[in-house]
Amino acid sequence: MTREFDYEEQFHGRDRKKWRKERRQAQATDRSKFKKTDREEKASVDIDPSWRQGRVVAITGEGIWVDREGKRILATLKGLFKKEKMEAKNLIAVGDLVYLTDDDSIVHIAERTSFLARTDISGRKEQLIAVNIDQAIIAVSVVQPPLKPALVDRYLIAAEKGNICPIIVINKIDLLDAGPLSEKERYLDFLSVYEKLGVPILSISTTTHTGLDALRALLKNKTSVFSGQSGVGKSSLINAAYGLNLKIGEMAQKTAKGSHTTTTAELIALPDGGYCVDTPGVRSFGIWKLTKDEVIHHFHDFAGLGCKYPDCLHINEPECAVLRALEEQKLAPLRYESYCSLIDEATGGLDNWTKRKL
Ligand SMILES: Nc1nc2c(ncn2[C@@H]2O[C@H](COP(=O)(O)OP(=O)(O)O)[C@@H](O)[C@H]2O)c(=O)[nH]1
Ligand SMILES: [Mg+2]
Ligand SMILES: [Zn+2]
């Protein structure tokens, strides 16, 4: 076993071995899903025994913070990597396993097992949010900010592309009792649609502490990335579950969208084992290189509706069974709206970032 794997075991626990085996088996049957990126291919270099290992815990204006044998140090990226910066928005991400020389410069980034990426704000580059993670906590809130199923689907697809297990966390359920009945109905519609997809869903309130035990149980000994819109309560969830003190934002200042209090993604060690990454909120989330086939694969439940056209996009085709199911209320409008938004993105309809409606 190489040193690289030893270090990974330390971070991910024994599950990693089993998971690697499953991944290898899946790779044998479906190569496309686990195709290595160019970045990963480049990673196969000889490890110099004098290099030291570390893990990227945060990237700030000051530089790259690395946990090196339990110490948090500020590392620099060697010049040779910088040349590659043209291809991706960021070459290195939180969660990266790195090799350092004695002067704390990063000389090698280990092959990644998973990643969560999005299209950067310019729409032209891939932006890595976190890498080498087991699961993505897709955090949403009810009422404030409003539930956005299309954003959830985007995260679900991004998680699948990046080889990460998704978990949906619906936070602020305390607001349901006070809000209008329509909000509660929307929440129940959301639950019924997404439960059928087989994704674990937790309903939580950090205010009343509902559901926090279940959250802790899911996070234990795993590395999880908290993702989702700004203001849904990602930092509050981590604080409430572990008694931590991450900065949280006050809602309803100027825009009612929540202020961006968490400014950089950060890897945090959890008191009872495992790690989590708190990320700054996003307003919109584009999926890097999203294809029409990926969207169709994600909405596999549409296949059961019996559309007779093999290449039907179910947008405006006459006699489309998906459209009929929608009319007959056999298909939830929120699921269909989400589908349209993603098909639009995959077919280039949303080149203009501002057109994206989530
Ligand atoms: N009513 C209610 N408010 C919450 C809950 N969890 C968080 N908040 C509030 O939501 C706002 C945004 O929280 P924050 O954790 O900063 O969200 P983040 O941007 O996703 O990290 C803060 O004002 C929190 O106090 C909850 O369960 N119920
Ligand atoms: Mg936050
Ligand atoms: Zn159709």
Image (tube, rainbow, N blue to C red):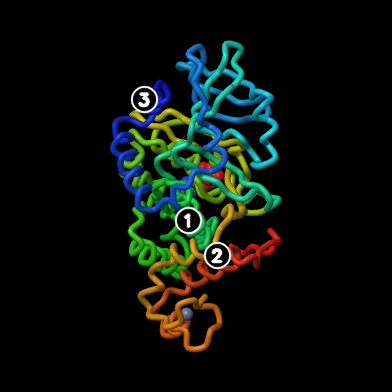
Q: Residue at x 55, y 39 (%)?
A: 248
- Describe the element under mark 3 as helix, strand or loop: helix
Q: Is 316 on the left-hand or right-hand side of 156?
A: right
x, y percent for residue 237: 44, 42
Q: Which mark is residue 10?
A: 3
Q: Which residue does the numbered mark 2 point to in the structure image? A: 342
Res. 14 image quadrant: top left
Vertical comparison of 147 with 339: above or below? above
User: Identity of the amino acid at label 3?
Assistant: Gln
Residues marked 1 and 3 touching at CB (< 8 Å):
no
Vertical comparison of 293 with 289: above or below? below
Vertical comparison of 296 with 56: above or below? below
Vertical comparison of 160 with 47: above or below? below
Q: Give the Cα distance between marks 1 and 2.
A: 10 Å
Residue 34 versus residue 163: which sits nearer the camera?
34
Around disc 2, counting alpha carbons within 10 Å, would you say few (fewer than 14), some (14 to 19), or many (20 or more)? many
Query: Does any atom of ligand 2 lie closer than 8 Å to the CB of label 3?
Result: no
Q: Which residue does the numbered mark 1 point to in the structure image? A: 157
Question: Taking the image as drawn, is residue 171 in sight?
Answer: no
- Describe the element under mark 2 as helix, strand or loop: helix
Around disc 1, counting alpha carbons within 10 Å, would you say few (fewer than 14), some (14 to 19), or many (20 or more)? many
